[in-house]
Amino acid sequence: MRTLPLWLATSALLLAQTPPPAVKSPEVHADRRITFRVRAPKANQVTFFGDWMKIGDTLAMTRDDGGVWSITVGPMPPSIYLYNFTMDGVNIADPVNPRIKLRAQTSASMVEVPGEPSSTPWQARDVPHGAVEINWVNSKMLEGDPRWVWIYTPPGYEKGSRRYPVLYLFHGSNDIAGGWTLAGQMNFIFDNLLSEKKVEPMIVVMPFGHAVPFGSPRELQARNNELFERHVLEDVVPMVEGKYRVKPGREQRAIAGLSMGGGQALSIGWKHLDKFSAVGAFSAAVPGDFEKQFDAALAAPDKTNAKLKVFWIGCGRDDFLFERNEKFTVMLTSKGIHNTWRATEGNHTYTYWRKYLAEFAPLLFR
Amino acid sequence: MRTLPLWLATSALLLAQTPPPAVKSPEVHADRRITFRVRAPKANQVTFFGDWMKIGDTLAMTRDDGGVWSITVGPMPPSIYLYNFTMDGVNIADPVNPRIKLRAQTSASMVEVPGEPSSTPWQARDVPHGAVEINWVNSKMLEGDPRWVWIYTPPGYEKGSRRYPVLYLFHGSNDIAGGWTLAGQMNFIFDNLLSEKKVEPMIVVMPFGHAVPFGSPRELQARNNELFERHVLEDVVPMVEGKYRVKPGREQRAIAGLSMGGGQALSIGWKHLDKFSAVGAFSAAVPGDFEKQFDAALAAPDKTNAKLKVFWIGCGRDDFLFERNEKFTVMLTSKGIHNTWRATEGNHTYTYWRKYLAEFAPLLFR
């Protein structure tokens, strides 16, 4: 047997530097209940928010004699949930959970409740895995550091000379370019669908939707979508088409997004039907001026329908954008624009966006 | 002018959901001082720790009448620093800073103090950028979900059929596979060195060094390095050599790491001199049994020196591992093993590891 006495000493030193957790949090139980804990002996009040809850609601956490605050919820349906604590008024991520949700701003952590593979297409399985490549693009029109673009390539991409169609996939407000990967697990969704031959192999391009910083003054924030559109078309698409083996032409490009990114996909997609043949809107912030901006395309439904091979709109009934999306599809249908409208259960979270992606992606490039 | 009334309404809704920052934090001033702030009106005490400070030290933050706690430090030398607050005994990341340091455990945020390009090789510049690809590997020997491996490819990798040498680069304890990218900005270091033709184009492979969870019971933790070695040699290297265009043979492979990863690089490198021709140890947790484990190689310095084209050891004088590293190089030199020993200023942080990488990488594959 090898002895590693000084290794252990080193471990002890390093552990002294970064103490092991005083509490276990989150703890997912076999019955799919979850216990959250935070050691905060001096706090006066600690509350809990999970992203399945109504925005603004909180749950009280209970303090034990040792100063550990805890709450147990569920049983919860299988998903990956976002949550945070509020400690004496300050929103914090779970201090001992390594799975932090990177955001444009505000803190949250993630917890995964596993389920049966047949109903959880976002869970990692023992199948071939694609990869997600972070590219940095020197933007011609955006100031500051280069912008990152996360790009999924399917398993086997590096082999051979095959060319692939491309889905441009946008995140929502307060998220980052890596959101669809780190919280959406879009890579595992595609890996799993590919292993079941339910989806065409494709490249998925995920740029950063905050062209101006999230939380900018209103005048600047109002320019975000216009600047993002230019960034996508002038920085991102040329990089993708120069670097990756993509199939050319509008029939080989789709565009989709969630929330703010759903609005961006609607705007950019409809404005450039010469470049995109499929549009997906998940819980979309439908542009308020959509009818005005696209009056010509709406007035020529046959021509528009011929271009839009897939037009998919999904929103949950508990989503604060549900009514707007429902009105949008009613308007579209009244004007003869073909669209698939999926009014689902659920709210404004990745719990549903993962499912929408798993439903939308198989429709593309068939 | 386009009017976007409902866009604005949506923004307002989304902003209501995720309020804009009540405070600006961190704020980097033109004179390189930094102000950190957190709004916590109900807290009794908030303290500050920055990674340039001595471990265990804290700085008191001052509360204003509005309940905002703040501290100003510096002027600071250009770098990217890690820091955290302790609010009534709970370690938290900066709640309004999007740049969170993902870790295996414990929370911290990052703040970048810019400097002149000539002395800050980690800063993004307007040069061609390589990419970092996240791969997921189904491990043969490690339980649980597939392990991620972050892999840098130099600009232009996708063009042509050129093959590249490979540096295996390991992170430290409590870090993640993405640490060298997200905190170390190794991609910009290589991009910049390449643009100045100071480094050979190479592929850099960054696996996850916690084969067993960080904070595991001591008996399990003691097996980490042995399991990680198998993971690297049996899972990672075959994936890399099967997927990427790499040059074959020991002359085309280097291995390096920081802290825990430095110890791993020393162990794996020396144990497999048939596979690696260069070893780098940055603030390394030098294995305590190194002399015993490698007595044969140490007793045959000519043979070992002929195999080790580059053997680079760096540590800062304020690092808690300095003495151990110094003794290590004294031992090596006394036995006739060639090594480059860089005793630098500095402590156990990425501030120095970025510099070590920028100094080490140009020595490789020449």
Image (tube, coloured by chain):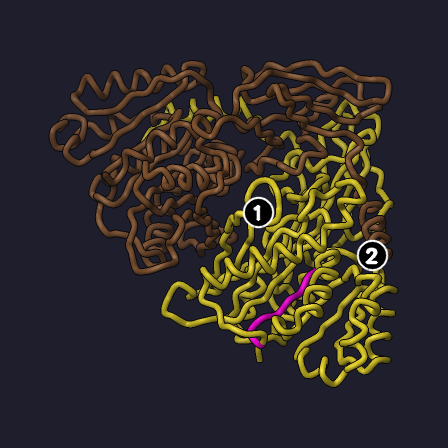
Chain colours: A brown, B yellow
The location of residue B241, given as percent across then percent down, is: 49, 64
Is A171 placed above or below B265 here? Answer: above
Q: Residues within 10 Å of mark 1 (few under 14, many from 20)?
A: many
What residue is shown at x 37% (from left), y 50% (from top)? Answer: A236
Residue at figure coordinates x 82%, y 57% from the top left: A4
Asked whether, in this view, residue A347 is left or right of residue B333, the answer is left
Residue B5 visible in image: yes
* Dot 2 amino acid type: Leu
Q: Secondary structure at mark 2?
A: loop
**Residue range of the region highlighted in magenta in the rendering:** B251-257
User: For this view, does B354 lie left or right of residue A7?
Assistant: left
Which picture quadrant has residue B43? top right
Q: Which residue is mark 2?
A: A4
Can you tell which mark lies on residue A211? Answer: none
A18 and A235: which one is in front? Answer: A18
Write down the residue under mark 1. Answer: B147
Residue B159 horizontal/vertical position (percent): 37, 66
Residue A59: image x %, image y %? 66, 14
Locate the N terminus of chain B by quadrant: top left
B35 left or right of B150 in image = right
> Which chain is disc 1 placed on?
B
Of residues B163 and A120, the one drawn nearer to the viewer in this rendering: A120
